[in-house]
Image (spheres, rainbow, N blue to C red):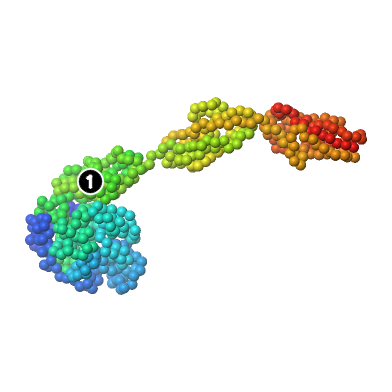
Amino acid sequence: MKLRLPFLSLLLLVGTFLWATIPAGYYTSAETKNTANLRTALQSIITSSHSVTSYDGLWTSYHTTDINPATGKIWDMYSNCEFTWSVDQNSGVSGPECTNYNREHSVPQSWFSEASPMVSELFHVYPSDTHVNGMRGNYPYGEVGTATYTSQNGSKLGSSSNAGYAGTVFEPIDEYKGDFARTYFYMATRYASVCQNWASGATVVFGSNLGFTTYAVNLFLSWSRSDPVSAKEISRNDAVYAIQHNRNPYIDYPGTEELIWGNNTTGSFSTNQQVVVVPTVTTPSSTNILTTSASIGGNITSTGGANITESGIYYSTNSGFADGAGTKVTASATGTGLFSTSVTGLNVSTTYYFKAYATNSAGAGYSLQSSFVTITPVVAPTITTPALQTATSTNAIVSANVTNNGGEILTERGFYWSTTNGFADGAGTKIAVAGTSTGAFSTTIGSLSTSTTYYFKGFASNSAGTVYTSQASFTTTAMDPPSFVVGTVIGSGSIMTFGKVSSALSKTVFIKAIGLSGDLTVAADGEMFSASSPTIIKENADSGFLLTITYNPTAVGAHTGQVIISGGGLTNPYTISLTGQK
């Protein structure tokens, strides 16, 4: 648990921790021993003095072993719930998290068939939230890759990310990983003669490697190194001793596990001299993450009682890679404190896993695994399909399509156009089109000349640069003719018939022309016919103008005439033939 007291991270001190009350001579028979002999000696010590507590007696014991002094509530390592001792004790009622607490066998009782004394062993049966306890079930501890359940304090259930076991595991939060590791060191020692013969579920953890499997040794040594002994554990060790009359040597003398399973197996156990153990490294961190580089490091919280001879990080693309595996990059740290080092030559858009480490004469200590993802580089956008939507005598609508923004929003998009075939990218006349996203876009190119070929390219820009489409082209049409409307559209040379009349009669023609260069001139030919205006100014012709033609015969008989519309840039005048009779 990472609620440190001063110099606890020295791991093993002269004599004992000042806070622990170890009886004089309690560990004498373990002096000078290591590996299997030390485990056997410790088993004898903690077994011979063990007074077995009843299963019901656990409820009472929690009042002295597991009360958080800061809150006065039950100290639950699986949740953030605040339970009042006895009042919130489980009485057969289940519910969501924080309903009540029960007795959690950190070594599942199904593994040892609920046999005594393990079933009521205070050193591994903790008070915990009933719901989270049920979610944990009898799954082994481990580190979760993909979580299927997460409690309110961050404890997780899910698939294992550690080498050696691929099944479902339960992962407590970092603050308590060392607590559970030292619990298992105790259980593999106190029950050394039986633990490797427990039921099949236990075989993930308990085996022939001095009570453990390789998976368990790697996991629990890593947890104990990254989460040193805390005041909580020391206080609980003393409280359990007052009830069971035995102790957890891995709390009394942190680093003892290294003498049995770790990287100090050539050392020897002593209660009156400092033993050098591997450094403690925590808080793996990554900063300044770029496309192919990052700054990675950690925090050396304890030198292990000796000089740091090397520090740095290991990284890999494999989650759960073993300590000391992967690619090593050294740093310059030689004592406690934060450190980092630069890692280069990485692949873009890639997840990397890493561990910080520090080495002394006892070996290397590693942090827990962390990870980072190199960023995806921004590339120029992709733009395709320049196309003409429509063209008139003086305007054209063109389009293009941005199919990929290159990894960030566009800074600009639009078109360049020119009358020069093969004009260079970025040359010609530019038209920017509002918008920063992918997809098709279009714009109108105006004020063009009639009957002229134009060339155009779409473009799109981001911080990586500007890209262009291939060149496309269009040709504007000739001058658009006026449209003459008398009920229905009629063209040049059409005949307007007034029929047989006895007095003057007027009819209206709707005149509309697009792309005129000036005003239109209107002339009525024939003495019986007249037009309402001799001139149609360009603006009126652009929007549409009603021209009135009047037939006012002054003599009996058949009459003919015509209206002639010219000027304004028309190539040929337009005529309307007129007939009438009086």
- Lateral position of residue 457 relative to residue 2, left or right: right
Give the residue displayed 51% in from the left and 31% down from the top: 471
Q: Which residue lies furthest to the right in this view?
A: 556
Q: Which amino acid does label 1 sit on?
A: Ala
Q: Position of residue 526 (x, y in %)?
A: 85, 30
Q: Quadrant of residue 207?
A: bottom left
Give the residue displayed 28% in from the left and 44% down from the top: 296
**Image quadrant for the C terminus?**
top right
Can the viewer see residue 151? Answer: yes
Can the viewer see residue 5? Answer: no
Give the residue displayed 34% in from the left and 58% down from the top: 148
* Vertical position of residue 469 compared to residue 273: above or below: above
Say which of 452 and 464 sits in front.
Answer: 452
Q: Position of residue 476 (x, y in %)?
A: 62, 31
Q: Mark 1: which secondary structure?
A: loop
Q: Quadrant of residue 35?
A: bottom left
Q: In which quarter of the image is residue 377?
A: top left
Q: Look at mark 1 in the image and give the residue it sits on.
A: 325
Q: Position of residue 241 (x, y in %)?
A: 16, 66
Q: Residue furthest top?
A: 420
